[in-house]
Image (cartoon, grey):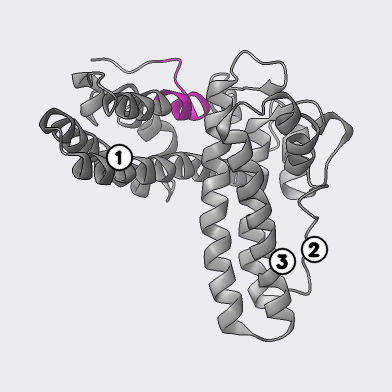
Amino acid sequence: MSSNPKLDLGLARIAHLNWEYEMESATKGSSISLEAQSHEDCELGRWLNGPAQRNYGALESIQPLLVAHKAFHQAASRLAIACNDGGEKNISQELETVRRLSRDIIFHLTEMELEALEKSHITTSNARQPRSLFQRLFAGPYHALPEDKGTLKVSQARLIHLRWERNLMEAFRHRGKDITLESSEICALGVWINATGVKRYSDLPEIAKLDETHKAFHTHAKNVISALRNKQDKRAEASYKQTREFSRRVIYLLSAIEYKLLDSDNVQSTDSFLDLNLSHQ
């Protein structure tokens, strides 16, 4: 089967979520397609082994993505068997594995996007690059702007969130002296969650989970900075480990919300900035 020429880093996340939700439906009696069980034949797999290898094969993050994607489909096959056998314990275990690996896939796709943007920022001044995103990624601001209140820009939110986590890792070198953390209420993502997300989409379970997870991320990040400044290295390392886990969950939930609110004016869904640039080259 040929790869989808329209699939890119942004749409790859959405294509993958289709397969994850198909796995969940299977636990309620639906069937799983053969395409969804094969890591080489699914839409994301064809993209990974085609355009992704050509455009991003040199990036470090592509290898863990390939490993996670293959493992996801192996778990999906085991889930299909468990559903056919009717063993509730096995179904629950395999479904949890599918969900964990799905979070990994979404995270590694975001890592690829950030890594490629960082390389692009260093090596080129291409006028087609979205300057507002580059400014927010590499120069700030990291707090909310007026437009953040009503519209969630998912791609910006994912990339800025991951970039900030990377900055936090650098803070270990300077004992937290050169980094500041906005509160969860006034950062860009927090403003959208409180002003629009929880008010307009309270029926969407991912919104409440995102609110809780985002606050936990800020709490652990704040603990990292405090521990570093007080020379409590073990506490800082433990908090940073938690920060990374909650960061991964935030990125996944943002993608899930994007998927479920594709037609909403309050969520801006975009193709990958990278692939849009490549299409002009």
Q: Which residue carries the number 3 mark?
A: 222
Task: Say what secondary structure mark 1 lies in.
Answer: helix
Determine whether 254 is above or below 215 in the image.
above
Q: Position of residue 94 (x, y in %)?
A: 25, 43
Mark 1 nearby-residue class (10 Å; few <14, some 14–19, many ≥20):
many
Would residue 96 be found to the left or right of residue 55 on screen?
A: left
Determine whether 82 is above or below 181 in the image.
above
> Residue placed at 68% from the left, 62% from the top?
219
Residue 13 belongs to the span the image colors magenta: yes
In this view, the mark in front (2 or 3):
3
Judging depth in this view, the residue of 16 and 278 nearest the camera is 16
Q: Earlier in the sequence, mark 2 or mark 3?
A: 2
Q: Are marks 2 and 1 in contact (CB under 8 Å)?
A: no
Determine whether 213 is above or below 265 in the image.
below
> Residue placed at 18% from the left, 31% from the top?
83
Residue 180 numbered tag: 2
Judging depth in this view, the residue of 101 and 196 nearest the camera is 196
Residue 95 numbered tag: 1
Q: Position of residue 239 (x, y in %)?
A: 58, 70
Distance in Å between CA atoms under marks 3 and 1: 33 Å
Q: Earlier in the sequence, mark 3 or mark 1?
A: 1
Mark 3 nearby-residue class (10 Å; few <14, some 14–19, many ≥20):
many
Q: Which residues are magenta?
A: 5-15
Would residue 48 be found to the left or right of residue 164 on screen?
A: left
**Quarter of image, res 82:** top left
Distance in Å between CA atoms under marks 2 and 1: 38 Å
Task: Say what secondary structure mark 2 lies in.
Answer: loop
Residue 62 seen: no
Q: Position of residue 107 (x, y in %)?
A: 48, 44
